[in-house]
Each structure stands twice: as structure tokens, then as C-alpha cells.
Image: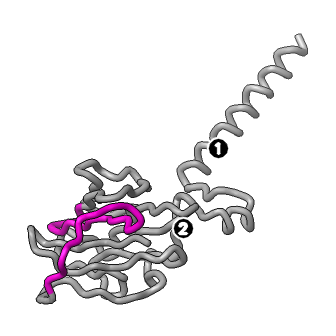
Amino acid sequence: MAKIIVKLKEKTLHEIILSQDTVTTIGRDPSNSIHLVNPAVSRFHARICSAGGEFYIEDMGSSNGTLVNDKMVPLTTELSNKDKITIGKYTLIFVDQNLDYEDVKTDKSDETVFVRKTESPKKSGEDRKPAIPDQQSSKKQGLWEITSKEKILFLAALVLIGILLLFFFLGSDK
């Protein structure tokens, strides 16, 4: 079992238990599982999902990005015990409870973070899938998700191959 400890400066605000079968969403929109009130946090900033028993954080195209251990998350990053996630002015600590960790007491006074248990956001972020799908969904689909940029590159490569074949066959008639 794993959890996220939400901190503001040195003050612990909440502890959220992560589940293997649900997606934990993070953002400024109240429909997120972890609602962070800060202008530097996007409405649907990031999400934490699991695949193969491991947890991953995925930046949802946020304006200011997501940092894990002070490094920008390119898209998806596997989380390890005691990883420090920075979103806006908040620090989220990932704790794998199967490993040894230092227990942190939760301060019950909270003015800026609201926690709501939800499956996933029902707004603009709902159509995105994790970059690393779980084993069951990848077996059902049979394919990995392809981004629009990858589709454009693939089509451009096909057109280039077609042009090269055309020149090859036209040039071989001489």
C-alpha cells in the first residue's frame, strides 16, 4: 500500500492512501482527488496511476509542470519511496508503506487543500489515458496509445517513402 503526504512548506496537511485500481487526480479543479488551491496549479495538473504493482505520476500538460525530486517530469515518471513531488507551492511525498518510512503526523488544520475520493476528472482531462497502460487494458486494446504528433510523423514518413518509390520506378524505365 502506498500513500501521498501533502505538505505546504513544512506543515503536513493531509495523507491520501493510493489504491492500485483507481486514478488519483491532482489539480486546481474541485473535481480532482487532490484539490490544490494555488494559481500555479493547473485545473487538471497531474495524475497518479498504477501499472504492474508500481505507481506512476503523469503530468497532464500543465502550464508550470510537475517536478519529481527537483527534476521536471517529461510525461510519466515511476515513483519510488520518499520521492518529493512539487506542484505549485505544494510538496507531495510518495511513501511506499511496504518499505520502511518515517511516520509523519497529520495536522488537521487545513485551509487550502480539499481531498475528495473520485475515479477521475469528468472535464477536459477525462479523455487522456495513462502513458503506461496497465497490463489488462493493453491486452484488450492490443496497441499503445499514439499521440497526434506521432501520427503526423508516421504519415509524413509514408508520403516520403511513396515519393522515393515513385522516383525509383520512374527512373528505372530509362
Q: Which residue is mark 2?
A: 129
Magenta span contains residue 104 = yes
Horizontally, residue 156 falls left or right of residue 82, namely right
Q: Quadrant of the C terminus?
A: top right
- How packed is label 2: few (under 14 Cα within 10 Å), some, or many (20 or more)? few
Q: Which residues are magenta?
A: 86-107
Q: Secondary structure at mark 1?
A: helix
Q: Secondary structure at mark 2?
A: loop
Instruction: Give the residue at x 51% y 73%.
Output: 20
Q: Nearer the viewer, residue 7 or 111?
A: 7
Q: Which residue is mark 1?
A: 154
Pick out the residue farthest to the right: 173
- If you read the primary sequence from the N terminus, does the residue marked by circle 1 or circle 2 appear first? 2
Magenta span contains residue 157 = no
Instruction: Give the residue at x 30% y 75%.
Output: 27
* Mark 1 vs mark 2: in front: 2
Q: Which mark is residue 63?
A: none
Instruction: Tell me how far mark 1 sits from mark 2, CA to CA.
Output: 21 Å
Instruction: Give the residue at x 44% y 74%.
Output: 125
Horizontally, residue 172 falls left or right of residue 77, namely right
